[in-house]
Amino acid sequence: MERFDYRRMSFYQIWIRSFADGNGDGIGDLYGVYDKLDYIASLGVDGIWFSPIYPSPNADYGYDISDYRNIHPDYGTLEQFRKVLDRAHELGLRVIMDLVINHTSDEHPWFLESRKSRTGPYSDYYIWRDPKWKGESRLPPNNWYSQFEGLAWEYCPEREQYYLHVFAKKQPDLNMDNPKVREEVKGIMRFWLDMGVDGFREDVITFISKHPQLPDGLPFVPAINGMPFYKDGPNLMAYLREFRAVAREYGAVQIGEAPMTPLKTAMTYLTGEDRVLDMMIQFDTMMADCFMTEYIHLPFSLPKLKRAFSKWQLALSGKGWNALYLENHDHPRVISRYGSEEYWRESGTMLAAAYLFQQGTPFIYQGQEIGMTNIRLGSIEEYQDVATINTYHSFRRHQSEEKRLRHVHIASRDSARTPVQWDDSEYAGFSSVKPWFAVNPNYREINVSREEGDEQSILNFYRRCLRLRKGSETLLWGDYREYFPLHRGIYLYERSYRGERILVVCSFSKKEQDWQLPKGYAWEGSQVLLCNYPGEPKPGKLRPYETQVLRW
Ligand code: GLC
Ligand code: CA
């Protein structure tokens, strides 16, 4: 039984450490969140997704959990969380938590026990394997690399075995084939659902079932060579069904993160009465300027972006439901990638219209709604993210420091993890003391307070978009169709429902462009619902990064 219709909703993502500092120690927290709940509600969103707020040694900023049933002391207490949850509900905001169960922290009590011996009650909670021996040399069980930090295996002298970590060393992978581990997961889900939480965003959930033999991957592919053997694995559906049963009891929503899952496989998770996920975070739309990862940068390609959009729109139409996003805590800021910092306001608003009016549930990442852009720090020492730092030290070592740093500027997740810019006071109104991480120096121009007072701001444009979407049956349920897919400067899509048609036209160019209505349309009888330039738009003309939403 669903207790709410997530399809009508949109979500705001909080990465708490950089959201708002309520107690003056330079770190974002639940006191800050509480104070900003009215602001979040004022955007017109219907829910919040919290990136992890649990106790964590922060090897991967919360994605390495050492206690699943508590709040990190940096962020507050369970009591403060309940206050946030209750107030959010009063404001009509649903709250979903991040469920990170592919791995724990190596400081989680389960792991501390597990590493002690091969026979204890927790010995089989993680993926342990004997070494391979080549004469006298001890080698890891296979040749997999981790995604964040060297090889995927770490030796543990107490057990004389290796444990698997697909991500950082401090993130050992759980052994989901152990039924006791799955019971733990269900217990964690119930703990938060009993408290009143409305669902979960499920971290790399498609990685939890490993190939039983853990075979070698390709030797020359770094970072992801084991992926074919841990992604979309043999028991994944069975395990997801078990978790689904718990979510169903509560009518909770489940959004699964699924890097590199092909469409055909995704359909098995997302469609049919017995689907195991309500929505999926696919990565195709994050690859319009790179190959696989932002670190392999390519020039931005609008046709590639449009292909990714349309692929998911068409495939799930009438069968499943899309999660729509352009930013989160794992990717650089979208204006700096797909838009233009030069045409900051224009491209920031255009990008909003490019995705918010597709069919699906939109997710907006903190700071996206004011058009925050990438930070460019002066040295690698100033970066915090484990993936950024290790990538910097492992690749392109023959290149100059300047060049390598430029890559970091383009690709780092830290580009999107700087403190939210609330106003133009010192530290951008995020905190009264020096924040844990650098504030983007552009905070005097880009901040909430300034944009509140400007009708044309990115912030107010997001508000208009969300209002329009929620009030329009056509934008909620209508069919999606794309026109001129090969056009290199314009994205044009249609939503149609019960005789009403809405066209969304988006310019991805710094130049003025002409455009034509598709066949079967005429300018007469059209109504402008939205435009990101003041005044009436000119038929058939697009200014730099202009977007228009037109109705027939
Ligand atoms: C997901 C998270 C990311 C994290 C990784 C490992 O991709 O979104 O932030 O580093 O999983 O937990
Ligand atoms: Ca704080």
Image (cartoon, rainbow, N blue to C red):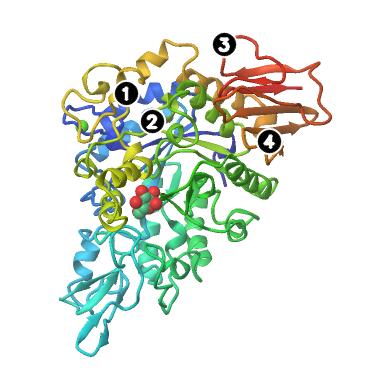
Tags 1 and 2 in contact by the CB under 8 Å rule?
yes
Disc 3, SS: loop
- Which one is earlier in the sequence, the residue at label 3 or at label 1? 1
- Which one is earlier in the sequence, the residue at label 1 or at label 2? 2
Q: Which mark is residue 534?
A: 3
**Can the viewer see residue 99 in this picture?**
no
Tags 3 and 4 in contact by the CB under 8 Å rule?
no
Foreground residue among 283 and 363: 283
**Amino acid carrying mark 4 in the image:** Trp
**Amino acid carrying mark 3 in the image:** Pro
Disc 2, SS: loop
- Which one is earlier in the sequence, the residue at label 2 or at label 4? 2
Inter-mark Cα distance, 1 to 2: 9 Å
Q: Which residue is mark 4?
A: 477
Q: Is the distance from the Cβ of mark 4 to the nearest ligand 1 atom less than 8 Å?
A: no
Disc 1, SS: helix
Q: Which residue is mark 1?
A: 442
